[in-house]
Amino acid sequence: MGLLDRLRTIGRRGPAFRAGPGAVNAAPRAADPYAILQTPLLRFSGTDDFTLGAGTQGVAVFGGVGRGMTSGSGRAFAHAFLEAGFGGLVLCAKADEADLWRRYCAETGRTDDLLILRPGGEHGFNSGEEALHHGGGAGYVEKVVKIFRKARAAGGG
């Protein structure tokens, strides 16, 4: 099974809403199709919830070096997203960041969903092949070529 096929399979599993620290098990049942966006992912206090809807809008954690952004709030958000069945792309800047995400996935029962892309690794992604075989025709290929040209120009090449 190719990488994109595996990602599509993982995506079809849908939200799990597993029990865990700060997680909430049941999504609200209502006629309003947007009610699920009010599902709490994290409880900050008795009245402050971080909801599924807020989770789809992005998170930024700020603080000084050594102030616990990764081990505190970053870990809490990562666990909440993983426990709720979220998928995503994590770009690692630190040498030990991939190991940290391996641990988060193990702690939340998501190890089977983890795909690590690295040179020479088990998984890879060939954007050119994707564009040619699954991209929807010449218009898509043109877009990919433009992206590569912009990337090359930005890199000074």
Image (spheres, grey):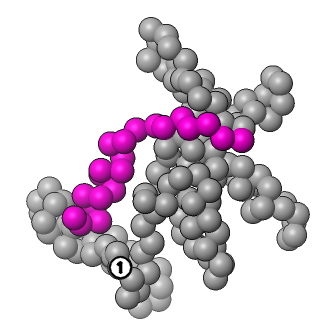
Q: Which residue is disc 1 drawn over?
A: 122
12 with respect to 82 (left or right): left
Relative to 60, does residue 127 appear above or below in the rendering?
below
Question: For residue 52, what is the image quadrant?
Answer: top right
Position in image of residue 111 (x %, y %): 49, 60
**Span highlighted in magenta in the image:** 1-21
User: Which sits in the foreground, 51 or 136?
Assistant: 51
Most extreme residue toward the top is: 31
Kindly identify the residue that appears in the image at 41 percent across and 91 percent down: 157
Amino acid type at circle 1 is Glu
Decide: is 117 above or below 2.
Answer: below
Residue drawn 61% across and 37% down? 19
**In the rendered image of this protein, does residue 30 appear above or below residue 86?**
above
Q: Quadrant of residue 120?
A: bottom left
Q: Is residue 56 visible?
A: no
Give whichever of 12, 145 is nearer the camera: 12
For the N terminus, the image quarter is bottom left
In the figure, is residue 3 to the left or right of 69?
Answer: left
Q: Can residue 21 be seen here?
A: yes
Dot 1 surroundings within 10 Å: few (below 14), some, or many (20 or more)? Answer: few
Q: Is residue 119 left or right of residue 91?
A: left
Above or below 92: residue 136:
above
- Secondary structure beneath dot 1 equals loop
Assess whether residue 33 is covered by the magenta stretch. no
- At 46% from the left edge and 37% from the top edge, which residue is drawn? 15
Q: Position of residue 41 (x, y in %)?
A: 64, 35
| Residue 124 image point, x, y percent | 33, 76
